[in-house]
Image: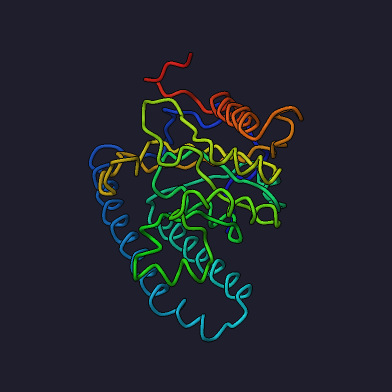
Amino acid sequence: MQYENSGTTKGKGSAQHGSRDPNTPSGVAAWLDCAWRLIGTGLGFALFGLGGLVLGIVVFPLSFVLVRDPAKRQEFARSLIASAFRAFIWFMKSIGGLSYEVHGTEHMSDTRRMVIIANHPSLIDVVFLVSFFPRSECVIKRAVTRNPFMRGTVSAANYISNENPEQLLATCSERVTAGSSLILFPEGTRSTHGERLRFKPGAAAIAVRSKARVLPILIQCHPPTLRKHEPWYHIPRHRPHWTFEVHPPLETVDSYGPEDNLRQATRKLQARLLDHYEMHLPASPDVTRE
């Protein structure tokens, strides 16, 4: 994927909320633009679902027959999934449904033994991240692994299911320790607009257990869209723009001392990660930080 406006990571609030492109349409043109984006977004999600269906019930089941080596099958599956996600983003960008930019791409070159974390403002954040990091591990919801149309996809890609919470941390830690990168949203779900970020300890616990670096990615979407409990057809008045700021990796061991046990180290790293995001993400106008 060609990253737009790639460069070094900027400082706090580099994406200015409230700024408008002087070419943004207004009046009747704005109404037509919104209607066009509504149609295009619906078509985009329909094609996304259709593509997933074809991959899940045709392509990936065949891969179990044609590709005997599990490692090669996993690589093929993840590459194909990332390509499908890139195609979706390209389509949405081509019809004017979205735009995006990535800063700090120099920090994306070597993600071995790394926990990649990001805040989660919109539904399609994971689509972007998987397209950026096609070889990374992902944690999949139990409902997805049991879906007859998605089961083949998840199995071929060998993604991690959250079906067994007691085993989840161990599995994630083992794969990262073995050299993989892992994409996680520390919030565990999409952000709630107007509320402060709340990180669960899972990402920090995995990083501590595997002694992996943590790659923080700060995501901003303006105007907000595809938020939690918001249907896809609630199209914003202006074209949404995603900004991805990839910060330098954080060394996990710098967050705690040798005297700390696993739980204490996890809490300290969790607090450090949350502080990092609150320091660099612009505050929502209806959020008061203590």
Quadrant where the N terminus sits is bottom right
How far across and how far down the image is residue 229, in percent? Answer: 28, 41
Q: Is residue 211 left or right of residue 132?
A: right
Instruction: Identify the image's colour scheme: rainbow, by chain, secondary structure or one colour.
Output: rainbow
Instruction: State which quadrant residue 107 falls in.
Output: top right
When asked about the image quadrant of residue 180, the answer is: bottom right
Taking 117 as reference, is 156 above or below it? below
Query: What is the x, y in percent for residue 200?
Result: 49, 35
Please give left or right for residue 7 compared with residue 82 in the image.
right
Identify which residue is drawn at 30% across, 61% down. Answer: 43
Give the residue at the far bottom of this rendering.
66
Give the residue at x 47% y 42%: 242
Q: Residue at x 36, y 26 (%)?
A: 194
* Whether residue 160 is situated above or below residue 261 in the rendered picture: below
Residue at the top extreme of this rendering: 290
Left or right, 143 with respect to 265, comes to: left
Q: Residue 119: where, in percent of width, then height? A: 49, 38
Q: Foreground: 128 or 60?
A: 60
Q: Position of residue 20 (x, y in %)?
A: 42, 32
